[in-house]
Image (tube, rainbow, N blue to C red):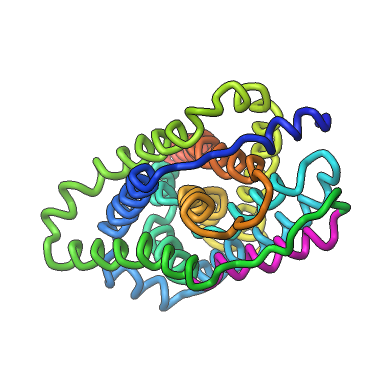
Amino acid sequence: MSPETIQIIDSIDVTLNAGGMNTINIVLAFVMYGVALGIHPSIFVDIFKKPKSLILGMVCQLVLLPLLTFLLTLLFGSSISWTMALGMILVASCPGGNISNFMSSLSKANVELSVSLTAVSTALSVLLTPFNFWLYGNLYLHSANVAGEVPTLIIPLWDVFKTIFILLGIPLTAGVLTAKYLPKVAAAIKKPLQYLSIVFFLAMVVLSFAGNLDAFMKCIKYIFLIVLIHNLLALSIGFWVGTSFHVPKKDRRTLTIETGIQNSGLGLVLLLGTSIFAGFPPHGGTLVITAWWGVWHIVSGLTVSTVFNRYQKRIDRI
């Protein structure tokens, strides 16, 4: 990637007024509420009786993905800017994505395990998302040959904690309570919300970059390649860990999907709604990587899910 292209990407600046930011926050909270409608306490009983796959899923998402993403950013070297590298690390630090349960269902995977992984990773993200982003972000800035003056990455812990708790913790709790005490209501609105969540995220990306469309289109082929490689890494982590530890095929599919689908919507909210980058120069690379990840993992998730689905149908015919 040429220095001129990197400059175009990093010059992209997205600013939202209070109304726009509140809209994005409401959308993300609404999406997480829809995810939680499928969470019943009984789901966790069997999963925690045999926790092997759950533990492996947590290791994939919370340990291996951030670590290997950091190594991948070093491998890319000067092909990416430091802001793009931080975008990759931010996405890898986020919990599982809100559409992973739908993808697992389509994959004929272990949906109960998928829901459990989403719930646990989301709960832990209150602490681990800012920690992993701070740890690997600073490691990258100190390890890579970053040109110019780059400020130390300082995470406003209370700011980030509050944002994640309000946008994930409260909707998650409300959804679980709805599923428990109003099961008919939960069953009626659960599936429509899964489809709407995809539309909501795409609308959020369009609104965020509407004023930078020309710059975005000039660099999309480079962003596409970087996110493609990163997403393939995430999917591969789940698949090979599941294969190496001989978990059931349904669980292996779930680990693949859960590790490959990240809540990049949360990443966008943290970038636009907190003071993570206070004092930093324009950070378009971080924003573009985070936003395109959210678009691409829908495509890759549907593709992988379709492959798993067809494979299972072929097995069933035998």
Q: Residue at x 70, y 47 (%)?
A: 83
Residue 153 image offset from top left, x and y in percent: 68, 63
Q: Residue furthest right?
A: 145
Magenta stretch contains residue 135: yes
Q: Residue at x 25, y 57 (%)?
A: 37
| Quarter of the rendering occupied by the N terminus | top right
- Depth check: give the residue in front, 297 or 150: 150
Residue 102 shows in the view: no
Left or right: residue 186 compared with residue 271? left
Residue 114 shows in the view: yes
- Depth check: give the residue in front, 299 or 22: 22
How many numbered discs sit on the rendered protein?
Answer: 0
Position above or below: 235 against 39: above
Position above or below: 23 against 277: above
- The part of the chain drawn in magenta is 126-144
Residue 278 image offset from top left, x and y in percent: 60, 57
Residue 141 image offset from top left, x and y in percent: 78, 59
Q: Residue at x 51, y 36 (%)?
A: 295
